[in-house]
């Protein structure tokens, strides 16, 4: 991506070094009328816009509603902007069912988004600058997506530390899950 940060303008350095947690945008025109039925501060949206063409995450999780001795189980999906958001969400929700890495496909190759089911998130020191920690996303097919400022490859990274493990699915359940999304 960037072989030398010193060659970038201060604005560019700021942009590439920030977490950009302003990934999703919407407006009042996309607010669904059913929002009035939810608790104060909660809204239902008919659409959101992606502000940046960079990786983001889609997490399926299960939660249980309890009232007295009755229980109802629900499955929801949350869209998260950063790996830090994923790690924080996982620390608060024990029942993650699946996690997907959404990667932009270059416009020169038709655009759109590549969706990969993840088995885990790892990190390792970047060989170009060991002070920087590079995130590695392990995919269900055995390959890895490396999010490195200096374009390190999985083979170049040493001493990986696992940050999070996701449920592992059989090939059959993976294809079924992909059909649902």
Image (cartoon, rainbow, N blue to C red):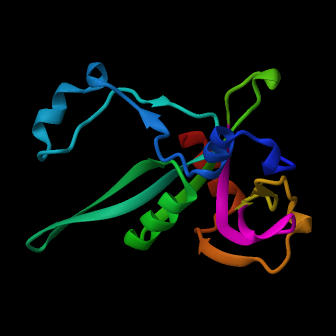
Quadrant position of the C terminus in the picture: top right
Query: Which residue is most to the top?
Result: 29
Give the answer, above or below, for where 114 lies relative to 151.
Answer: above
Q: As rendered, which of 90 and 97 lies closer to the eye?
A: 90
Q: What is the x, y in percent for residue 45?
A: 31, 31
Whether residue 129 is in magenta: the answer is: yes
**Residue sitting at 51 percent across and 48 percent down?**
81
Number of marks present in the image shown: 0
Q: What kind of secondary structure does the magenta stretch mostly adopt?
A: strand
Estimate the x, y position of residue 32 in percent, counting from the top left.
Answer: 24, 27
Q: Nearer the viewer, residue 63 or 27?
A: 27
Judged left or right of residue 149, residue 42 is: left
The image position of residue 56, as x and y in percent, is 58, 46
Q: Is residue 1 visible?
A: no
Farthest-out residue, left: 68
Residue 110 lies, with reference to residue 92, above or below; the image says above
Q: Nearer the viewer, residue 14 or 93?
A: 14
Q: Residue at x 64, y 68 (%)?
A: 168
Which x, y percent locates residue 146? 77, 57
Q: Which image quarter: residue 157?
A: bottom right
Locate the N terminus by quadrant.
top right
What range is drawn magenta here?
114-137
């Amino acid at each position: 991506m960037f072989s030398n940060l010193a060659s970038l303008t201060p604005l560019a350095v700021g942009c590439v070094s920030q977490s950009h947690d302003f990934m999703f945008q919407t407006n009042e025109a996309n607010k669904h009328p059913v929002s009035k039925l939810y608790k104060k501060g909660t809204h239902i949206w008919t659409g959101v816009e992606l502000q940046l063409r960079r990786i983001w995450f889609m997490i399926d999780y299960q939660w249980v509603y309890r009232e007295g001795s009755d229980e109802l189980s629900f499955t929801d999906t949350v869209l998260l902007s950063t790996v830090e958001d994923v790690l924080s969400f996982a620390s608060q929700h024990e029942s993650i069912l699946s996690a997907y890495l959404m990667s932009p496909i270059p416009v020169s190759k038709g655009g759109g988004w590549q969706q990969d089911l993840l088995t885990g998130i790892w990190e390792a020191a970047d060989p170009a600058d060991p002070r920087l920690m590079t995130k590695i996303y392990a995919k269900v097919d055995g390959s890895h997506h490396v999010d490195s400022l200096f374009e390190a490859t999985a083979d170049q990274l040493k001493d990986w530390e696992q940050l999070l493990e996701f449920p592992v699915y059989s090939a059959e359940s993976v294809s079924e899950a992909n059909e649902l999304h």
